[in-house]
Amino acid sequence: MIGFWNPLPPAEGTLREKTPPMTALDYAKQFAGGVWEAKLDKAIARLRFKVIMNGNAIESTGVVYIPPAKDAKPGTPSKTILMMLTRYGYDPVEKSTYVLDIHNHDTVYLGHARVEGKVFVNDFTRQVGGPGHWIERTTLTDKDTMESVLYSIDEKSKQTEVERFTFKRVAK
């Protein structure tokens, strides 16, 4: 096949934007690496994100636990109250990033993630363990600080803040 050089500019509307918008999957890749930790009332949450499946998905594992009291005997174990496994991947039908989130053995959430400006938004519903709808808005305030706000959504789509978290990347 012989190729030809075309000196004319491309037809109107055929050029892509200079910078395509960041996808939710791209945003989530920024969470990968290290251990993220947040102090909650008396508990501690720890998350670890990694890029999997040749960069086409993100997996997060996490735990929420209550550490032993300061005056506890050495070797006293922490009390685990929640184990989490989350997967972000591409949904080819919706052409968006899906979220599959499992808490312990008895609660499963499913939804989609998107980026609104500089905010990573998870919009998900409970599939196993009873009804429920939530939105979590997460912002990376710097490469090692993640601010998240969780909202419950009622039948009239009213958002009510449930909890705020500040995660710090504590280990690389």
Image (cartoon, helix red, strand yellow):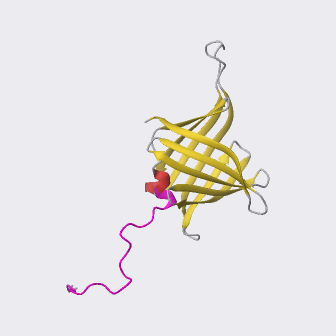
> At 46% from the left edge and 41% from the top edge, which residue is drawn?
144
Question: Could you say which is closer to the camera, residue 158 or residue 102?
Answer: 158
Residue 77: x %, y % from top left? 65, 22
Taking 146 as reference, is 157 above or below it? below
Taking 48 as reference, is 8 above or below it? below
> At 26% from the left edge and 84% from the top edge, which residue is drawn?
9
As drawn, is 111 to the left or to the right of 155? left
- Tell me, yes or no, whether the highlighted magenta stretch contains residue 80: no
Residue 22: x %, y % from top left? 45, 61
- Tell me, yes or no, whether the highlighted magenta stretch contains residue 5: yes
Residue 158: x %, y % from top left? 74, 59
**Quarter assignment of residue 89:** bottom right
Secondary structure, magenta segment, majority class:
loop
- Dividing the image into 4 quarters, which one contains the N terminus? bottom left
Q: How many numbered marks appear?
A: 0
Question: Could you say which is closer to the camera, residue 89 or residue 125?
Answer: 125
**Quarter assignment of residue 76:** top right
> At 59% from the left edge and 46% from the top edge, which residue is drawn?
148
**Magenta-drawn segment:** 4-26
> At 50% from the left edge and 52% from the top edge, which residue is drawn?
28
Residue 172: x %, y % from top left? 43, 36
As drawn, is 5 to the left or to the right of 70? left
